Amino acid sequence: MVPELTNGEFEKFAKEGLAFVDFFADWCMPCTMMSPIIDDLSEEFRGKIKFGKINVDENQKIAQKFEITSIPTFVLIKGSEILERISGIVTQDELEEVLKKHL
């Protein structure tokens, strides 16, 4: 299961290596639908990419920093650089392809 991060935990989480962040809200049905896919990907890429979730309602500071205007939005970052940004419902295969090209 992918850990949920807070404003305070995020900086340490994102500091080193590749990190995949799932921006979501509890009330968001598409976010709920994507959650099992994100969990599967976190297992598949364990040790290569860190995975975390940010609840946009509880962590507005980070959501604003990354200019999150719709959810779900998935962001792949390395340090402070955004490598990829994907919004909406996507397939597991599509996300795998995006992640693999950054390994």
Image: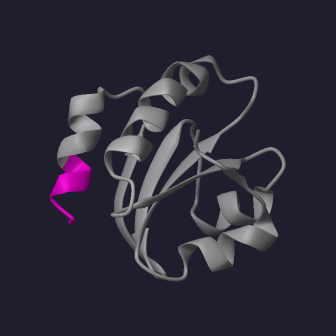
| Residue situated in front as seen by the camera: 94 or 43 | 43
Which scheme is used to colour this image of the protein? Answer: one colour
Report the residue at 24% width, 42% height from top. 96
| Quarter the C terminus occupies | bottom left
State whether residue 79 is above or below residue 63.
below
> Horizontal and vertical percent for residue 1?
59, 38
Report the residue at 40% width, 77% height from top. 17
Q: Is residue 5 left or right of residue 32?
A: right
**Where, by quadrant of the figure, is residue 91 drawn?**
top left
State whether residue 4 is above or below residue 48.
above
| Residue situated in front as seen by the camera: 37 or 7 | 37
State whether residue 21 is above or below residue 88.
below
> Horizontal and vertical percent for residue 28?
67, 24
> Horizontal and vertical percent for residue 14?
55, 74
Q: Which residues are magenta?
A: 98-103
State whether residue 103 is above or below residue 95.
below
| Residue situated in front as seen by the camera: 67 or 53 | 53
Report the residue at 54% width, 29% height from top. 35
Report the residue at 18% width, 54% height from top. 100
Count how many numbered circles sit on residues in the image.
Answer: 0
In reply to whether residue 4 is colored magenta, the answer given is no
